[in-house]
Image (spheres, rainbow, N blue to C red):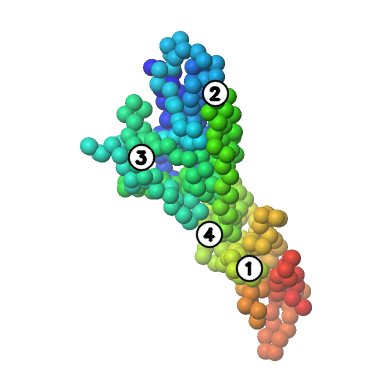
């Protein structure tokens, strides 16, 4: 087997495992055999796309001398995206090109039009610009999906942002060393994560893995008045499937985390407090206040009723008690 094919076979072995999304990272590897160089970004474990760049090595050795007779040679300023047949299926008879595969990340879909079957590597491939918006969307999301006629694959994005950055730097440097500089292009801004995505990722991070929650555990709100959805996480309704089932609950109180869009990305952490519960209280300005349930010491009396809770609202910089 030629060196290039052996390297690709090793990369594809990482893509052969199929199933639901798991905690997986992306890893970049690089190779320079003297006749050709290449770099690959691929999931460490699980199905998913592999991004590759490659060209003649600046060392200038003969391919016959190195044995690399099937190298990856990619266009300037582009990555070659490979998808294993064991990830999205082998081609049907007479169907060597397909348009059914869709990358879905951050609420947007990116169709891979013109995926071509590579019989030598038993994989599908397409060349995409290094600034393709799908890469920025994957980097900004916690996970993404591969949708195709045969089903859906969910994958983690952990490590993708750093990996694609390293891949781009290496590829640009190597191409420039052989007199083929990449075009000067402005980097695409990473798509902003929603507060719901951040909240769900925070739950899984605190649980150290998968979790499930009741509908009341994640409350959509409008707290800061900026028009973007804010999220309140009530850990009373969250159960971790590994480790301690209720890591953020004590004998009475549970953690309440408030993801306020005005704080991201400047602060990048939720407001948090311990409470017996939480509910949303509409205000006259159209925003929501937070009513935290507490002990008898926090009771407030109104005509005909007693409520043991405190109200907090957004004052433009932080959550403060409503007096």
The quadrant of the image that shows the N terminus is: top left
From the image, state whether disc 2 or disc 4 is nearer to you.
2
The quadrant of the image that shows the C terminus is: bottom right
- Residue depicted at x 40% and y 17%: 69
Which of marks 4 and 1 precedes in the sequence?
A: 4
Q: CA distance from mark 1 to mark 2?
A: 50 Å
Q: What residue is disc 2 on? A: 178
In the rendered image, which quarter is residue 221 located in?
bottom right
Is disc 3 surrounded by few (<14), some (14 to 19) or many (20+) residues within 10 Å?
Answer: many
Q: CA distance from mark 1 to mark 3?
A: 41 Å
Which of marks 2 and 1 precedes in the sequence?
A: 2
From the image, state whether disc 4 or disc 3 is nearer to you.
3
Q: Are marks 1 and 4 in contact (CB under 8 Å)?
A: no
Which of marks 3 and 1 precedes in the sequence?
A: 3
Q: Are marks 1 and 3 in contact (CB under 8 Å)?
A: no
- Residue 193 pos. (x, y %): 57, 55
Which of marks 3 and 4 precedes in the sequence?
A: 3
Q: CA distance from mark 1 to mark 4?
A: 27 Å
Which mark identifies residue 115? 3
Which of marks 4 and 2 precedes in the sequence?
A: 2
């Amino acid at each position: 087997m030629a060196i290039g094919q052996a390297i690709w076979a090793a990369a594809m072995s990482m893509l052969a495992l199929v199933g639901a999304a798991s905690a997986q990272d992306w890893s970049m590897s690089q190779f320079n055999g003297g006749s050709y160089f290449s770099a690959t970004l691929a999931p460490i474990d699980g199905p998913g796309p592999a991004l590759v760049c490659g060209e003649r090595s600046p060392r200038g050795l003969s391919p016959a001398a190195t044995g690399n007779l099937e190298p990856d040679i990619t266009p300037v300023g582009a990555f070659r995206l490979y998808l294993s047949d064991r990830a999205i299926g082998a081609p049907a008879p007479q169907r060597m090109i397909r348009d059914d595969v869709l990358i879905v990340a951050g609420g947007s879909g990116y169709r891979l039009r013109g995926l071509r079957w590579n019989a030598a590597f038993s994989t599908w491939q397409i060349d995409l610009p290094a600034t393709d918006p799908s890469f920025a969307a994957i980097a900004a999301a916690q996970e993404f999906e591969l949708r195709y006629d045969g089903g859906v694959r969910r994958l983690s994005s952990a490590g993708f942002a750093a990996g694609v950055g390293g891949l781009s730097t290496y590829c640009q440097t190597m191409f420039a060393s052989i007199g083929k500089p990449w075009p000067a292009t402005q980097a695409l801004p990473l798509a902003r994560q929603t507060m719901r995505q951040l909240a769900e990722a925070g739950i899984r991070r605190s649980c150290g893995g998968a979790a499930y929650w009741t509908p009341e555990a994640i409350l959509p709100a409008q707290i800061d008045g900026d028009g973007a959805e804010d999220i309140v996480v009530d850990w009373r309704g969250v159960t971790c499937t590994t480790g301690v089932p209720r890591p953020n609950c004590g004998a009475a109180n549970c953690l309440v985390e408030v993801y306020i869009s005005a704080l991201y990305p400047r602060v990048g952490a939720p407001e948090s407090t311990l409470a017996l519960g939480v509910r949303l209280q509409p205000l006259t300005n159209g925003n929501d206040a937070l009513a935290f349930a507490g002990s008898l010491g926090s009771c407030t009396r109104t005509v005909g009723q007693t409520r043991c809770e405190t109200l907090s609202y957004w004052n433009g910089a932080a959550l403060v008690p409503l007096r």
